[in-house]
Amino acid sequence: MNLHTSMLGGAAGVVMLAGSALAQDSYYDTNPTPEERAQTERLNTDAANRAQSAVDSSAAANASYHAELDAYERNRAAYDAERAAYERERAGYEANRGGYAHRWETFYGYSRFHSVDRMRSGALLGLAVSTRGGSRVGRIRDVDVGDDGRISRVSVSVGAGRTAWIDVDDLRYDPAARVVLTDLSRGQIDDMARMRYPRF
Protein backbone atom coordinates (compact mmCIF):
# COMPACT_ATOMS: atom_id res chain seq x y z
CA MET A 1 0.00 0.00 0.00
CA ASN A 2 1.45 3.36 -0.93
CA LEU A 3 1.36 6.48 1.17
CA HIS A 4 -1.36 8.18 -0.89
CA THR A 5 -3.74 5.26 -0.48
CA SER A 6 -3.04 5.07 3.19
CA MET A 7 -3.76 8.76 3.66
CA LEU A 8 -7.03 8.49 1.75
CA GLY A 9 -8.09 5.52 3.75
CA GLY A 10 -7.24 7.31 6.98
CA ALA A 11 -9.15 10.41 5.95
CA ALA A 12 -12.19 8.34 5.03
CA GLY A 13 -12.04 6.64 8.37
CA VAL A 14 -11.89 9.95 10.18
CA VAL A 15 -14.91 11.21 8.19
CA MET A 16 -16.88 8.03 8.96
CA LEU A 17 -16.04 8.21 12.65
CA ALA A 18 -17.00 11.86 12.78
CA GLY A 19 -20.29 11.18 10.94
CA SER A 20 -21.07 8.29 13.28
CA ALA A 21 -20.33 10.44 16.32
CA LEU A 22 -22.55 13.23 15.00
CA ALA A 23 -25.37 10.79 14.33
CA GLN A 24 -25.09 9.36 17.82
CA ASP A 25 -25.00 12.83 19.36
CA SER A 26 -28.11 13.78 17.37
CA TYR A 27 -29.93 10.57 18.35
CA TYR A 28 -29.10 10.66 22.02
CA ASP A 29 -29.62 14.41 22.55
CA THR A 30 -33.04 14.43 24.32
CA ASN A 31 -32.73 17.69 26.17
CA PRO A 32 -35.88 19.71 25.30
CA THR A 33 -35.69 23.27 24.25
CA PRO A 34 -37.24 26.00 26.43
CA GLU A 35 -40.14 26.25 24.00
CA GLU A 36 -40.76 22.48 24.24
CA ARG A 37 -40.61 22.60 28.04
CA ALA A 38 -43.09 25.49 28.10
CA GLN A 39 -45.44 23.67 25.74
CA THR A 40 -45.25 20.49 27.85
CA GLU A 41 -45.97 22.48 30.97
CA ARG A 42 -49.00 24.11 29.33
CA LEU A 43 -50.35 20.72 28.23
CA ASN A 44 -49.87 19.25 31.70
CA THR A 45 -51.53 22.28 33.33
CA ASP A 46 -54.50 22.10 30.92
CA ALA A 47 -54.93 18.39 31.57
CA ALA A 48 -54.79 18.92 35.34
CA ASN A 49 -57.31 21.79 35.12
CA ARG A 50 -59.72 19.69 33.05
CA ALA A 51 -59.43 16.82 35.51
CA GLN A 52 -60.06 19.11 38.48
CA SER A 53 -62.98 20.76 36.70
CA ALA A 54 -64.52 17.36 36.07
CA VAL A 55 -64.08 16.44 39.75
CA ASP A 56 -65.58 19.76 40.91
CA SER A 57 -68.51 19.43 38.49
CA SER A 58 -69.22 15.89 39.64
CA ALA A 59 -69.04 16.92 43.30
CA ALA A 60 -71.39 19.87 42.69
CA ALA A 61 -73.87 17.69 40.79
CA ASN A 62 -73.76 15.10 43.55
CA ALA A 63 -74.33 17.72 46.25
CA SER A 64 -77.24 19.23 44.27
CA TYR A 65 -78.83 15.80 43.78
CA HIS A 66 -78.64 15.00 47.50
CA ALA A 67 -80.04 18.43 48.42
CA GLU A 68 -82.99 17.94 46.05
CA LEU A 69 -83.54 14.41 47.36
CA ASP A 70 -83.56 15.66 50.97
CA ALA A 71 -86.02 18.43 50.06
CA TYR A 72 -88.29 15.94 48.28
CA GLU A 73 -88.26 13.56 51.24
CA ARG A 74 -89.07 16.41 53.65
CA ASN A 75 -91.95 17.56 51.43
CA ARG A 76 -93.20 14.00 51.09
CA ALA A 77 -93.12 13.50 54.88
CA ALA A 78 -95.01 16.77 55.41
CA TYR A 79 -97.58 15.75 52.78
CA ASP A 80 -98.06 12.33 54.39
CA ALA A 81 -98.57 13.97 57.79
CA GLU A 82 -101.12 16.44 56.35
CA ARG A 83 -102.90 13.66 54.49
CA ALA A 84 -103.11 11.52 57.66
CA ALA A 85 -104.47 14.48 59.65
CA TYR A 86 -107.04 15.18 56.93
CA GLU A 87 -108.15 11.54 56.84
CA ARG A 88 -108.55 11.50 60.64
CA GLU A 89 -110.61 14.69 60.59
CA ARG A 90 -112.74 13.42 57.72
CA ALA A 91 -113.31 10.08 59.46
CA GLY A 92 -114.35 11.94 62.62
CA TYR A 93 -116.74 14.11 60.63
CA GLU A 94 -118.32 11.08 58.95
CA ALA A 95 -118.67 9.25 62.28
CA ASN A 96 -120.32 12.25 63.95
CA ARG A 97 -122.52 12.93 60.96
CA GLY A 98 -123.80 9.37 60.94
CA GLY A 99 -124.60 9.50 64.63
CA TYR A 100 -126.80 12.59 64.61
CA ALA A 101 -130.51 12.07 65.08
CA HIS A 102 -131.49 15.22 63.15
CA ARG A 103 -134.26 14.59 60.67
CA TRP A 104 -135.38 16.88 57.92
CA GLU A 105 -138.92 16.45 59.17
CA THR A 106 -138.01 18.66 62.12
CA PHE A 107 -137.82 21.63 59.73
CA TYR A 108 -141.01 23.59 59.40
CA GLY A 109 -142.41 23.21 55.87
CA TYR A 110 -140.22 20.19 55.14
CA SER A 111 -142.58 18.94 52.45
CA ARG A 112 -141.71 21.81 50.14
CA PHE A 113 -137.92 21.29 50.33
CA HIS A 114 -136.04 20.11 47.29
CA SER A 115 -133.01 17.82 47.08
CA VAL A 116 -129.92 19.73 46.08
CA ASP A 117 -128.25 16.93 44.12
CA ARG A 118 -130.72 17.26 41.22
CA MET A 119 -130.46 21.01 40.89
CA ARG A 120 -128.41 22.82 38.25
CA SER A 121 -125.06 24.23 39.27
CA GLY A 122 -125.97 27.69 38.01
CA ALA A 123 -129.14 27.74 40.12
CA LEU A 124 -127.15 27.04 43.30
CA LEU A 125 -124.26 29.46 42.89
CA GLY A 126 -124.66 32.52 45.11
CA LEU A 127 -127.52 31.13 47.21
CA ALA A 128 -127.42 31.75 50.95
CA VAL A 129 -127.01 28.77 53.29
CA SER A 130 -128.58 28.76 56.77
CA THR A 131 -128.72 26.33 59.70
CA ARG A 132 -131.88 24.75 61.00
CA GLY A 133 -132.16 27.47 63.60
CA GLY A 134 -132.01 30.18 60.93
CA SER A 135 -128.40 31.19 61.53
CA ARG A 136 -126.70 32.40 58.37
CA VAL A 137 -123.72 30.24 57.35
CA GLY A 138 -122.57 31.83 54.11
CA ARG A 139 -123.06 31.62 50.34
CA ILE A 140 -122.45 28.83 47.84
CA ARG A 141 -119.34 29.59 45.77
CA ASP A 142 -118.72 26.31 43.96
CA VAL A 143 -120.22 22.89 43.32
CA ASP A 144 -118.72 19.45 42.85
CA VAL A 145 -120.40 17.09 40.39
CA GLY A 146 -120.04 13.31 40.63
CA ASP A 147 -119.57 10.78 37.84
CA ASP A 148 -123.35 10.37 37.59
CA GLY A 149 -123.75 14.06 36.71
CA ARG A 150 -125.41 14.93 40.01
CA ILE A 151 -124.10 17.49 42.46
CA SER A 152 -122.31 15.71 45.30
CA ARG A 153 -121.23 18.65 47.48
CA VAL A 154 -121.10 22.42 47.53
CA SER A 155 -118.48 24.91 48.66
CA VAL A 156 -119.79 27.50 51.11
CA SER A 157 -117.81 30.60 52.05
CA VAL A 158 -118.13 30.96 55.83
CA GLY A 159 -116.16 34.19 56.32
CA ALA A 160 -112.56 35.13 57.06
CA GLY A 161 -111.55 33.62 53.73
CA ARG A 162 -112.58 30.12 54.84
CA THR A 163 -114.59 27.59 52.86
CA ALA A 164 -116.55 24.51 53.93
CA TRP A 165 -117.42 21.71 51.51
CA ILE A 166 -120.83 20.35 52.55
CA ASP A 167 -122.29 17.11 51.20
CA VAL A 168 -125.69 17.40 49.50
CA ASP A 169 -127.19 14.90 51.97
CA ASP A 170 -126.80 17.64 54.58
CA LEU A 171 -128.56 20.26 52.44
CA ARG A 172 -132.08 21.01 51.25
CA TYR A 173 -133.38 23.87 49.11
CA ASP A 174 -136.35 25.91 50.22
CA PRO A 175 -137.83 27.43 47.03
CA ALA A 176 -140.21 29.68 48.96
CA ALA A 177 -137.41 31.40 50.88
CA ARG A 178 -134.85 30.82 48.12
CA VAL A 179 -132.33 29.60 50.66
CA VAL A 180 -130.39 26.38 51.14
CA LEU A 181 -130.83 24.85 54.59
CA THR A 182 -128.48 22.48 56.41
CA ASP A 183 -129.04 20.15 59.35
CA LEU A 184 -125.42 20.57 60.43
CA SER A 185 -124.54 22.78 63.38
CA ARG A 186 -122.40 25.87 62.99
CA GLY A 187 -119.68 24.12 64.97
CA GLN A 188 -119.65 21.20 62.53
CA ILE A 189 -119.45 23.56 59.58
CA ASP A 190 -116.58 25.48 61.18
CA ASP A 191 -114.75 22.19 61.71
CA MET A 192 -115.23 21.34 58.03
CA ALA A 193 -113.91 24.77 57.02
CA ARG A 194 -110.68 24.04 58.90
CA MET A 195 -110.13 20.79 56.99
CA ARG A 196 -107.82 21.20 54.03
CA TYR A 197 -107.13 18.39 51.61
CA PRO A 198 -103.33 18.35 51.25
CA ARG A 199 -101.70 19.07 47.89
CA PHE A 200 -98.29 17.66 46.95
Image (spheres, helix red, strand yellow):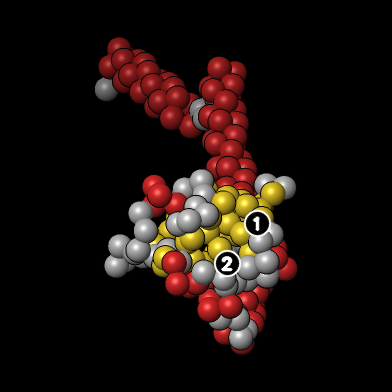
Look at the numbered disc 1 and give the secondary structure of its residue: strand
Q: Would you call the spot at circle 1 few (<14 residues within 10 Å), some (14-19), or many (20 or more)?
A: many
Q: Would you call the spot at circle 2 few (<14 residues within 10 Å), some (14-19), or many (20 or more)?
A: many
Q: Quadrant of residue 150?
A: bottom left
Q: Which residue is mark 1?
A: 137
Image spot of residue 121 (x, y percent): 39, 52
Q: With 44 as the anchor, is 28 left or right in this view?
A: left
Q: Is residue 101 above or below residue 186?
A: below
In depth, the one of 80 and 176 nearer the eye is 176
Q: With 102 as the anchor, is 21 left or right in this view?
A: left
In three-dimensional space, the C-alpha distance between marks 2 and 1, rounded to whole angstroms, equals 9 Å
Q: Amino acid at mark 2?
A: Thr
Q: Tag on residue 182?
A: 2
Q: Amino acid at mark 1?
A: Val
The C terminus sits in image quarter: bottom right
In depth, the one of 199 and 22 nearer the eye is 199
Work out whether residue 57 can be spotted: yes
Q: Residue at x 47, y 48 (%)?
A: 125
Work out whether residue 69 can be spotted: no
The N terminus sits in image quarter: top left
